[in-house]
Image: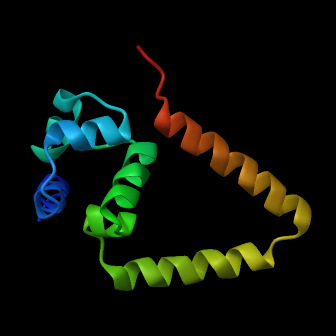
Amino acid sequence: MTIGERLRGLRLARNMSQEEVARHIGVTRSAYSHYEINNRQPVYSNLNKLALLFDVPIDYILNEDRTDYARETKQLLQLWHSLDHSSRQHTLYILRQSIQQADHPAQP
């Protein structure tokens, strides 16, 4: 199942229109429709809004295997705990910058 199929199924299960979902996440209906037909993928902030709206984890929308997700989460936590305070702060800074760039890509 694709991300678009998953989003469409979640939307229909809640008897919502594309317009309602789009308004909730702050995009146009046309932009949201591109998510459902797999012409475009939502940026992280919109993906997060969709997960909150539909009350599902982001990985459910992305159709990721929960086994891989759990293993990766455990590995990340082990790495995190191995860092000193300064390294953690630097890592958080880099993550925030990466997320911000993903949410607002540079225009050509």
Q: Is residue 40 visible?
A: no
- Quarter of the image for residue 32 reads top left
Residue at x 58% of width, y 43% of height: 98
Percent coordinates x, y for residue 74 in the rendering: 57, 83
In this rendering, the answer to whether 102 lies above or below 60 is above
Q: Position of residue 101 (x, y in %)?
A: 54, 35
Q: Quadrant of the C terminus?
A: top left
Determine which quarter of the picture holds residue 21: top left
Whether residue 46 appears in this view of the structure is yes
Residue at 68% across / 82% down in the picture? 78
Please give the name of the residue rendered at 22% of the width and 31% of the height, measured from the top-left corner. 31
Most foreground residue, 59 or 81: 59
- The quadrant in which residue 15 appears is bottom left
* Residue 97 rendering spot, x and y as whole percentages: 65, 40
Left or right: 9 as drawn, with respect to 101: left
* Nearest to the observer: residue 65 or residue 16: 16
